[in-house]
Image (cartoon, helix red, strand yellow):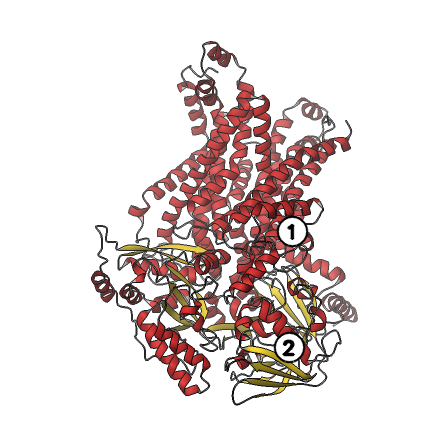
Amino acid sequence: MSKHLRKISAALMIAAMAMGAPAWAQSDTGAMVVGLSGDPTLINSGTTTEINSSVVGAQIYSTIIRLDPKGEPAPSLAKSWQVAPDGLTYTFKFFDGIKWHDGTPFTSKDVAWSLLNVNKLYNGPAGGLLEAVQAIETPDDQTAVFKLARPYPPLLRGLAYFNSSTILPKHIFDNGQDPRQNPANLKPIGTGPFMFKEMKKGSHILLERYPDYHQDGPNVERLIFQIIPNEAARALALEKAEIDFIPYHVMPLGEVERLQTNKAITVAFQKRVIAGQYQAFLNTREGPLANTAVRQALYFAMNRSELLAKAGFGHGKVSDGGPFSSELPVFYTADVKQYGYDPALANRMLDEAGFPRDASGKRFSLRISYSLSEGPMNDVSRLLRSQFAQVGVELVDKGMEASAWRDTSFVKWDYDITMGSFASGPDPAIGAEAFYTCKRIERLSGRNASGYCNAEVDRLFEAGGRELDEGKRTEAYRKAAAILAEDVPHWWLWDRYYPIAFQSKLEGITDDVTGYGTLDRVRWTQ
Amino acid sequence: MSLILYLLKRLLYTLPLMAGAIAIIFFLIHAAPGDPVDYLIGEAGASQEVVDRLRAQMGLDRPVIVQFGIYAFEVLRGNLGYSVVSGAPVLTLILERFPATLLLMATQYTLAAIIGITLGVVSARRPNSATDNVITFFSLASFAIPVFWLGQMMILIFGYYLDWFPIQGMTNLRKGYTGFAYVLDVAYHLTLPALTLAIYNVGLVLRLTRSSVIQVTGQDYIKVARAKGLSERTVLFKHALRNALLPVVTVIGVEIPGLIAGAVLAETVFGWPGLGRLTLDAINARDYPLLMGMFLFICLFVILANLVVDLLYAALDPRIRYS
Amino acid sequence: MNASASSITPANRSWQRFKANRKALFGLGVLILFLLAAVGAAQLAPYDQLAMGASFNPPSATHLLGTDSLGEDIFTNILYGARTSLIVGFCAVITSTILGTLVGATAGYFGGIPDTLLMRVTEMFQILPQFFLAIVIVALFGSSIWNVILVIGVLTWPVTARLLRAEFLTLRNREFVDAARSLGMSDFDIITREILPNALPPIIVNCTLQISSAILLETSLSFLGLGDPNVMSWGTMLHNAQDFFSRAWWMAAFPGLALFLATLSLNLVGDGLNDALNPKNI
């Protein structure tokens, strides 16, 4: 090679480097890009349950404890904890020298103030979780003592959740004003592994490594969340390495199969202890669905394997445990009434129940509603329309936008069938209970909208929620499951699995079991 | 009458219209089922007590007419309110996103104007020739292509299979470019969305240019220019085109609301961080103040754009006087 | 131009001019095909509307245009989609034309205060950003096909109103109107029998173009997920296809093509009608 040519190519290379590499971006592996479908409206899981907010917030804030890859409680802000034998006192000891990103020391007062003054008041699930907590005492800066009015076993795991139990800084939020109006919601200051740098709405959120993080890591300098609204484009962007990770709630299910064939991409399943199920609430107050035989018959008329295969792309398991997902260990049992696909039986049952076909072959018509933003529900509805047509039942599709759906289904109870994804865990006392007990027949989102009320079921849930002995708890819940599977106030469609996809060179992503875990242990290999 | 007086008169004329429009939208939005509290609480639900408190804090428990009165008063004071979801000032949220949309719109319209005018003039040179027929057909075709579909096809072909262009967003976030490199990077990301929207808009410009050039070339001063022995090209581009530009400018004004529609769709497909996405997000969250703010902003923008078009019109055609 | 004179001759002349325009004839041909598809969807479709087979079948002899993610036949859906698109297009334009005609005719014929008032209202509607408002209304109030039609109709009438008003302003002082008035005809009769027929040509052309933009608007709404879930529409098909556009190109390509051909043919016909009915703008 001639001298000249070498000089020119050297010059070109320098020019290219000058263009391509700003001072702080030494290598591509210094950064990690996560795809999201939309902006978190704010970054504060103390006041909202929005998943995007939790996924981003989990990197900036911390919870008292976290869950290890097996789902067991592990240290986070607290280095150790003790639960009194009577289940009424929880004592947490925090790490020394934890500092908020603005340099202020973290103390147990932050924990007490945040949970009782923000989370409990503004965050729905936290309100339920902390209902039994009477007081949080802070004998010193490193210790917090939770005093409970009654035993509440789910409390410990619940405190590991970012979408309910994020600890906020007292010195920033305790200013006498509405925490939802606090400017820190858009410029959060936390104790987590990453510091907030900038948020450009509609484009991205940029976080940088917090050098004083009290646990190990993080292992990337910059963590970027990029907004990609279009489903298919999100998968293409991953393949083109424009992004590195697609979390469970924004994973385009139809692309999973194709991504699996790409060696540079790993497709895994996010473990989630909330054990979500796609299920349909049935309005048991009026119309044909008030009749238990009709609810059972139509459950038989449903080809759930087809629903799962076509609408869910096979990512799950047809529910066979009634109200409990097979992903909810301990409490799940398949020893309940089963509903295999059997249209002939369904037809017979409907005839016997007194709903004969009319001249055109139709028995009756039902409205089916769901939120259009809930991935596969539109497809489920289309498939069900086809399946129910076989037994002479017409479905009228009432798919609607999310707020309107919550309003009509859960507040106005104006529906026949309404479907969505609902949690059966992390503990039946937190998840399933709200859907089936009489006292939860409230005009509120995520409560017993089907109007089902059975004193025996109530008694069993009551016993399960108070009982400290795991064996007795399990027995109570399994009995409740058997009754519910017989009465079918809901149709449980399938137990969800949650595919995620990321660059194969990333490791540590699958350690998380919540779905919005901290990415402090994630690193690039090679 | 002076120009400034004319502008003032126009504004005074438009304001009551806007006030009416805003009232219509306000009542429509508030009459719809669902409200921001449902969104904030999410599927997990919350107790009646929490719901009531949130509603009271947002002022949603008062009669709609009172809410409107309060809103109108605040707007007159120049306060568009705060997003009920993020708590940020509405105006800030909008202005934050506007530059991206403006960049996309300006680029695509410039492209559309250049391509459209060129093709229009070429087409008008020999009306009903084979070239003219092909171009006319193309112009009609460009109206008929849905912009979101075209965008997806562009992504698939030029972004994915050929791998020439990035497919999402406005910049390469991993690299985090600054300075001139940043400008280049944005231009690179801008290519596909701008081209997509431009193709969609070329048709109209092309057709208007063609018909006005044909009309103008029949007029006397063009015949004189030809008779003077000027080359056909000079006649077309220097004389005919200048007059033919008038309707093209008008069309920009007429089409600006349409451009916003195209932008909403294109921004969704290309992940472009502009106003389009903001609108959809605001609808999903039932963010009333933000929706109203967006609406006000778009209306004002349309009105201002039309004023600018009027001014351009005057600059291009000295015969027009304001009275 | 006297309305009472036989209209056969000018109509004939227009048809001759239209026939000479090959682009317009092509458009008319395609449009008739779509009309046939829409009317005969149930008879022409190879599969039942609710039939579900294997998912993601590429185009083949059994499924001419392939199947979608749920195993529905794309060709069948395109036929039913044609019905929806044309219903939306025609009904929305009928709505907007009725509104526009009422307003435009009243304003143009009576002039004065009614004119000023009605035109202010028209201008108010023209300030409203159509697409933005359409999204908001359909998203908030539900997306039944009649809602979509109503929204499109209510948002697009101002153009018709202004066109018609302009025509009325020029026509209302012609001799034949004066003649009718002196014969004691009522205002209503003068408007409907004398002026309106003469003002029709630009309205017809405008209608054709508005149908195509109504179809595009419906498709755009459906693409954003705001379509009526109980009827098949091309926009809904494109919406469903967007999640799979890298996996099943036929899901997006064929409905897109149908939409393209339908709007193109309407535009060609509109163009041809314009040339045929207003020979002065060649």
- Which residue is under mark 2? A112
Three-letter amino acid code at disc 2? Ala
Expressed as whole percent of the image width and height from the top left, the position of residue B118 reads 64, 40
Residue C26 in percent (x, y) is at 43, 37
Would you place residue C173 above or below residue B184 in this image? above
Depth-wise, is mark 1 or mark 2 nearer the camera?
Answer: 2
C1 vs B136: above or below: above
Q: Quadrant of residue C128?
A: top right
Q: Residue at x 62, y 65 (%)?
A: A226
> x%, y% of residue A279?
40, 67
The local crowd at label 1, few if under 14, some if 14 to 19, many if 20 or more residues have their Cα within 10 Å, is: many
Mark 1 residue type: Thr
Q: How many marks?
A: 2
Q: Which residue is mark 1?
A: B101
In-image side of B174 versus B265 (left or right) = right
Give how far across and how far down residue A172 sits, in percent. Answer: 71, 70
In this rendering, position of residue C89 left or right of residue C171: left
Residue at 42%, 46% (x, y): give it. C145
**Mark 1 falls within which chain?**
B
Which SS class for mark 1? helix
In the picture provided, is B286 more to the left or to the right than B184?
left
CA gap between label 1 and label 2 equals 45 Å
- Judged from this view, the residue extending furthest toward the bottom is A85
Which quadrant of the figure contains the C terminus of chain C?
top right
Q: What residue is at 41 percent from the left and 87 percent from the top?
A: A471
